[in-house]
Image (cartoon, rainbow, N blue to C red):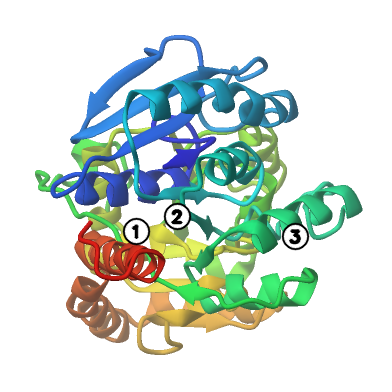
Amino acid sequence: MFNYEYPPLGGGGGVVHALIAEELAKQHRVCVITSGTKGLPPREERGGVEIIRVPVPGRSALAAASLVSLLSYPPAAWPKAWRLLRREGFDIINSHFAIPTGLGSLPVAKIAKIPHVLSIHGGDIYDPSKRLSPHRNAVLRSAVDAVLQASDAVIAQSNNTRDNTYRFYRYRGPIHIIPLGIRQPEYRSAGRAELGLPEGVFLGVTVGRLVRRKALDELLRVLADPECSRVHLVVVGDGPELATLQECAAELAVSDRVTFLGQVDEERKWQVLEAADAYLSTTMHEGFGLVYLEAMAAGIPIVTYDHGGQVDFLRDTETGYLVRSGHFNDFVSAVARVATRPDEAAVMGRHNRETFPRYRIEACAAAYESFFQDILDRASPGEAH
């Protein structure tokens, strides 16, 4: 498996890839070739997965990659992959993200004559917040198309990602949809006082990297609206937009109702989700949105826009409120409604907790395993793998 980002580097795409890899490693030999950075060993085994990290310049932050590190990954991955393949044989190569990962994995797969399965996660083909998003740039768009066309199979995690592929690229081959999943860890429940969060208020939570695509400045403006004057917000995550968001909160006079927790460990994240009253997100786009599943597992209603992969599993008035993308005033009203109707919010929270089990990582990994086996069976009928 190839991925330019793999925990602790990167965001949701790397996190779910690690979960899939660890589930597959319970029955199979799994190796991941990913990027390295200062402080991370060049090789380690974690969760039964062998992780090989290739040196890339320009990677100074865990949360976000630089353009230099992105461009450096493919050529850095090639020699490591060849050494690995000389050491032992592999049946299949699974590449996560069309670019830059696909440019690192595809040449290896073609020369070694190993089936290449491409997993697209959304942001690798479409990111409305970036000027250099592949769908806007002719060179990058051609690179994505080349990887799509040359892969033996393509997996998307949502209908939205599949539809964006057909909308912006020339590729017209089949795209198999495998919904993502999460693993809910065991954790100790904690009260708001212990977590340093305000008590006796309606508390919204949002989780993720603080990057432009998450549009957290818009969520702060929601808090500043008179309809949401009693809503407090806790922001879990770190990233390049932190200082800008803190300044924005001050300008909107909502700093006293916003808590920036920064990066926290898994247990603390789940404790905060459980302690909150609702999950709020004004993100521009999510290819899938793993954190929505986490909010469902924590039993809280979700208020977000209807642009992205989350529409595959979120339902308006059932899981919370799905607001038409770009309709700010409707979003404000939805937050105000969930904050002032606790009985209704409780029903949606219970629904989410009961619905979540179908999105456990075990189901996602099993679907991947079955898909890989089908490819191998078609390539070598009658042979066991």
Marks 2 and 1 close (CB-CB < 8 Å): yes
Q: Amino acid at mark 2?
A: His
State which quarter of the image contains the C terminus.
Answer: bottom left
Residue at 72% in and 42% down: 251
User: Which residue, given by chain and number where applicable, does mark 3 sit on?
Assistant: 145
Q: Give whichever of discs 2 and 3 has the lower sequence position.
A: 3
Label 2 crowd bin: few (<14), some (14–19), many (20+), radius 10 Å: many
Left or right of 118 on screen, residue 40: left
Which structural element holds mark 2? strand
Q: Amino acid at mark 1?
A: Val
User: Which residue, given by chain and number where applicable, does mark 2 sit on?
Assistant: 232
State which quarter of the image contains the N terminus.
Answer: top left
Q: Taking 36 as reference, is 112 above or below it?
A: below
Give residue 334's mark: none
Figure quadrant of residue 232 = bottom left
Residue at 50% in and 49% down: 96
Q: Percent x, y for residue 208? A: 48, 47
Q: Taking 7 as reference, is 202 above or below it?
A: below
Left or right of 177 on screen, residue 213: right
Q: Give whichever of discs 3 and 1 has the lower sequence position.
A: 3
User: Which residue, given by chain and number where applicable, does mark 1 sit on?
Assistant: 201
Residue at 54% in and 35% down: 4
